[in-house]
Image (cartoon, rainbow, N blue to C red):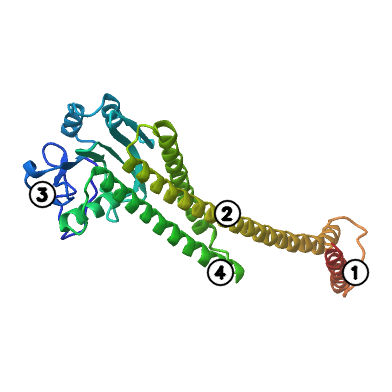
């Protein structure tokens, strides 16, 4: 079972499903207050472990759900979608893994609701779902309908993604400061990591914006006004985050271009130094090669100062070559 481990001392009951694969079941009155008496309930919220066989059987046997919604719940894929059929709004939307999950990142939660029932399903503990669950537990907020609760969950998810974008913006600020100070040599990998996270969040925001736009275009005349208003608000927030993510992506591309320019400049400098050394040592190599030939007739063999003469000539030629190459390099 794919369940993350909570920190020591954490109440595990909301994170471990029961024998039916159910994480929790909450009932709400018409005033949006949680009640433990099912007879007083105006609507209810059930949350399942989607990988649990018993949970899948219960969802599959839920006759109130339209067949399309049941199929969407039990589908193996995790692509985002949202649709409306027979007074049920259902879909698969992104959320952040909980902080104590093994690897933090974006995952998905599935939901379906009408006026009297909200069914949710997930694989890992989700940050937004858990935050709203705690709100329900402590009674700090009223949820008069499933639509209000789903909007709260999605709002919490968008807040979490906005926070992630803020952290990535701070990361880019630090990288940019170090690049400006010319202390950029260790910034390539952090920049790649930041851009990878931005790409994931940016794609999800683009998907959410398109999903809510599709929902509005396809079911504008069918959707009740509260759901229409909810979709409009969430679409606006997703579009805002999409634009913020696009700006941050543009910054990462500019920083990557600047890093590549600095790397190219550094490589050119190293190549220039290598070229100068090669040009300086080439005459000396030729001279040492000539005088190293074991043949007769070599000059200065019988002269006591022959070694110093050859050395002096080599140094003079090397110095002249060096000055010529430096002058040539400044002229380029």
- Quarter of the image where one finds residue 283: bottom right
Of the numbered discs 2 and 4, the one sitting upstream in the chain is: 4
Which residue is the site of mark 4?
177
Return the residue nearer the eye: 82 or 31: 31
- Judged left or right of residue 169, residue 314 is right
- Neighbor class of circle 2 (other Cα within 10 Å; few <14, some 14-19, many 20+) is few
Crowding near the residue tagged with mark 4, few <14, some 14–19, many ≥20 C-alpha atoms within 10 Å? few
Q: Secondary structure at mark 1?
A: loop
Q: Position of residue 257 (x, y in %)?
A: 63, 55
* Residue at 52% across, 57% down: 191
Residue named by callout 2:
250
Few, some or many residues within 10 Å of mark 1 (<14, 14–19, 20+): few
Relative to 249, is 83 on the left or the right? left
Q: Residue at label 1?
A: 302
- Disc 3: which residue: 35
Distance in Å between CA atoms under marks 1 and 3: 113 Å
Residue 261 visible, this angle: yes
């Amino acid at each position: 079972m794919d369940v993350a481990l909570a920190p020591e001392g954490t109440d595990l009951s909301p994170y471990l499903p029961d024998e039916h694969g159910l994480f929790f079941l909450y009932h709400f009155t018409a005033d949006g207050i949680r009640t433990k008496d099912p007879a007083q309930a105006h609507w209810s919220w059930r949350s399942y472990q989607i990988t649990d066989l018993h949970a899948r059987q219960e969802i599959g046997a839920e006759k109130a759900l339209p067949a399309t919604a049941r199929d969407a719940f039990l589908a193996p894929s995790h692509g985002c979608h949202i649709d409306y059929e027979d007074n049920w709004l259902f879909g698969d939307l992104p959320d952040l893994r909980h902080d104590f999950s093994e690897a933090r990142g974006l995952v998905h939660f599935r939901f379906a609701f009408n006026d009297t029932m909200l069914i949710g399903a997930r694989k890992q503990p989700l940050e937004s779902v858990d935050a709203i669950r705690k709100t329900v537990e402590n009674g700090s907020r009223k949820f008069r309908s499933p639509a209000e609760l789903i909007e709260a969950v999605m709002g919490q998810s968008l807040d979490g993604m906005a926070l992630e974008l803020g952290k990535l913006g701070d990361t880019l600020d630090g990288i940019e400061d170090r690049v400006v100070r010319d202390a950029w040599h260790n910034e390539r990998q952090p920049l790649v990591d930041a851009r990878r996270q931005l790409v994931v969040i940016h794609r999800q925001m683009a998907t959410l914006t398109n999903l809510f736009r599709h929902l509005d275009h396809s079911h504008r005349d069918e959707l009740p006004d509260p759901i229409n208003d909810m979709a409009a608000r969430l679409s606006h927030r997703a579009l805002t985050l999409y634009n913020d993510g696009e700006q941050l992506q543009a910054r990462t591309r500019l920083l990557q271009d600047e890093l590549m320019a600095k790397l190219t400049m550094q490589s050119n400098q190293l190549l220039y130094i290598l070229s100068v050394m090669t040009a300086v040592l080439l005459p000396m190599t030729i001279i040492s090669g000539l005088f190293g030939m074991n043949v007769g007739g070599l000059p200065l063999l019988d002269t006591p100062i022959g070694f110093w003469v050859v050395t002096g000539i080599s140094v003079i030629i090397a110095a002249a070559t060096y000055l010529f190459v430096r002058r040539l390099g400044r002229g380029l």
